[in-house]
Image (cartoon, rainbow, N blue to C red):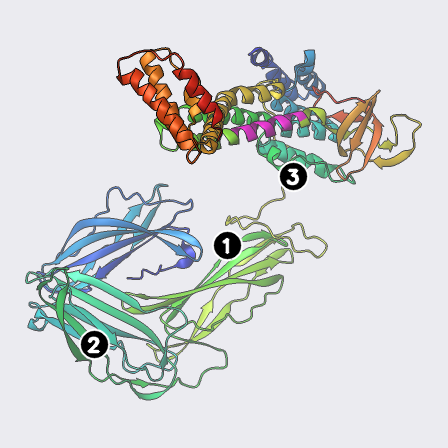
Amino acid sequence: MVIWLWLVAVAAAVQIQLRAEPAELRPGQAGTVRLLVVASTRGGPQADTRRPPPLPTGSGLVSQYVGQARQFQNVNGRITQILEIDYRINAVEPGTWSVGPVELTLDDGSRVRADAVQVKVAQGQATAEADEFSVEAGFDRESPYEGEVVVFHTKFQSRIPGAQVRWRLPEFDGLRPPNHGSPDDQVYTIGDPRGVITVQQVFVPLVAVATGSRDQSAAIGEVALPMGGADLFGFRKSRVEQVASKRLKLDIRPLPPPPPDFSGLVGDFEIRSTVQLKKAAVGQSVPWTLLVVGNGSLDGFGLPPYEAPGASIYENDADVSARIEGERYRATAAFNRVIVPTTVGELALPGLHLVTFSPSRGEYVTHDIEMPKITVVPGREGDGAVEVYGASGTSDAAEPVAIDVRPVYTWGRATAPSLRGLIGPAVGLAAAPGLLFLAGMGLRELASRRRLRSEATRGPPRAVDALRGLPSDPAERLVALDTALRRLEVEGAGREGLHEAMQSLRARLGRVRFGEGMPDPTLEDDIRKLVAEVKP
Amino acid sequence: MIALLAGIAHAGIVGDGAAAFEQGQLDDAISAWEQARADGGQPSGIVEYDLGIAYYRKGDLPRAASRFRAAARLRPRDPNVHHNLALVRSGLHGVPEPVGDPGWMQVVTPGELGLLGVILAGFGSLLVTVGPWVVSGGRQAGMVVLATGIVCGVVGARGAQDHALHPVGVVVDEEIVLRDAASIDAGERLRLPVGTEVRVERAWDGFLLIEDGRDRRGWVSSNAIDLAWTSTRVPSG
């Protein structure tokens, strides 16, 4: 569900609101009432939500705290925190009962209040049609005026867990979506003694842009109803049923002949004006906000030109937003202007008049906005340049203040020892263990690489190596001589006469090693000679 | 430690000067605060700041600017210092743009950065040597911390050295003439009005070679400039 904030322009303050889902129950059923707490995350007071506030209800309802959830949204570049505190309400007696109001105490001691909402408990039990599912679709009114916003809504409710609907909406003839305010999807459940009812609702705001009788055909819904148990992968088969709404018709009425100063707004609007200062200096900026709130479209609307003798009026930015609130369309526009007084004295700002068309009254309505008087005192008006002062929000003009030096310090250290000569040695001392360790690691790595490289380039062991440093033990010495002869065989392979000489030496060596053990004093020298003769 | 104890011993100077200041005795206050400079001591940022206010109250804006520059060097994050320095500068008309310090010196002092470097280098050393036995990837992290510490330390030491060798000075009393050489007979290069903040490059025989922040240099008699900090060793020659 899209929770569009009810006033994007006031994100700095804490706002709370109650929403009832659904707004109508039957005895024995249970719904949800949600307390939305919207606060800016940047400074400002916060609500203490450790203990949820009590939710007063009429005698036909019983409320119970369920839980709370927190989320963050980026609204016009500002991070806004939304706390949802949920209460379950049980319908006990038929009637229309109020839920709320609720007051929250903020951490700065101030209090904010959410107005009460109405919940209707209808007579009798839930209808039998709701046993499987039911659908509804239609407009909130049948005879809107041209330019008026109508809300098309669909509603699907079912007791079957997992049941869903997909709507194919008709081509709306003579209607178009407004620039502000997107469709709103709402999904909630109703606790019922015969099983939980899941409700899916969609609200689509549309502006009537043509006149006459407009046949909108019907909305088609494809209802998927799960059947049977889950398969191996957890999926359930479902059967699809198509349902159609009744034919939707609209009779769009033209507006009566407008007065010459008609603003173009069609809807029931409320206009509030706020001038932040009652006293200002010449040249000082006085913020002025005009808030237009109503159930009509604000597309393309701009404030009429405004002039005030003794002041310059500057247009600032404007925030326009709209949303579905409950089941109704609600648009808000905050126009920011700046009043800069140019003459000293009492600045009497002329009133502002805005003509709108009210569909509920069926006539044009003139809104007269009274403007306050501003006391203008001499200020620092320069040579034609407008100086802009910060809008502090205080009601008094800032008196000219002489800028002076800040006061002296009365205590503290009188001298500051210099660390200049110590920094370098201290850093070196602190870094030395690590650097030495790293250097050692580097040297070890270097030696290891050198060893690997030398091993990679070294050739196979040679006979002369075996004769270098012969062991003193006679038996080991003979083994070394045998090794030398074996290597020599490989080194001198293919040489003429070598084989015979080696055979002779091997025989002599074999006699010494495995024979009678008789010494052969020239054997070692003969082997050395042969090794020396055979050069690789 | 000795310097710390000496600082504590001199702590009463701040209060003594403040008491005289509150009674409107500006000269006594200045004398009291200037005591911090006795025996070659370097006044703290607080004393420099208080001296700046005292000179401001006396109407000696150039010396006030000099003291506030010194205070800004020692207390770069003190908004009062910057407020008062800006106020003094706004009262000095027709002076060129003051010479600036590197951007990081407006956030930390060289000493603070050097200290941070020492801590990081020590911690990095520890991680390099015993890190692998404590945490996975400890040696790599240690090398990064160690390198960061060394860089901080080097930059801090270099900044402190630069402060010492090239102090900021303010032209006081009267307009000065920058000359080609360290002599009163040398050719005239440029004139700088009272209140101009300049950087000293080196000293020679009672003269200072200064730079005005726009790469213009010249020699000037050392008593025409009030150095913002004096426990420095301006290189001669």
Badge 3: few (under 14), some or many (20 or more) residues near its Cα, within 10 Å? few
Badge 2: few (under 14), some or many (20 or more) residues near its Cα, within 10 Å? many
Q: Which residue is disc 1 drawn over?
A: A276
Which of the chains bears the disc numbered 2? A
User: Mark 2–mark 1 contact, CB under 8 Å?
Assistant: no
Q: Which residue is disc 3 drawn over?
A: A402
Measured Cα–Cα span from mark 3 to mark 1:
25 Å
Q: Main secondary structure of the magenta part?
A: helix
Q: Quadrant of the N terminus of chain A?
A: bottom left
* Percent coordinates x, y for residue A15 in the rendering: 35, 53
Badge 1: few (under 14), some or many (20 or more) residues near its Cα, within 10 Å? some
Q: Of residues A379 and A344, which is closer to you in this image? A: A379
Residue span colored magenta: B149-161
Q: Which mark is residue A221?
A: 2
Q: Secondary structure at mark 2?
A: strand
A282 vs A530, left or right, is right
Q: Secondary structure at mark 1?
A: loop
Which residue corresponds to the image point at 52% horizontal and 53% vertical from the top-left? A277
Which amino acid lies under the numbered mark 2 shown in the image of this protein? Answer: Gly
In primary-sequence order, the first of circles 3 and 1 is: 1
Q: Secondary structure at mark 3?
A: loop
Specify whether residue A433 is painted magenta: no
Determine if residue A334 is in view. no
In primary-sequence order, the first of circles 2 and 1 is: 2
Q: Are marks 2 and 1 on the same chain?
A: yes
Q: Of residues A67 and A14, which is closer to you in this image? A: A67
* Percent coordinates x, y for residue B227 in the rendering: 74, 25
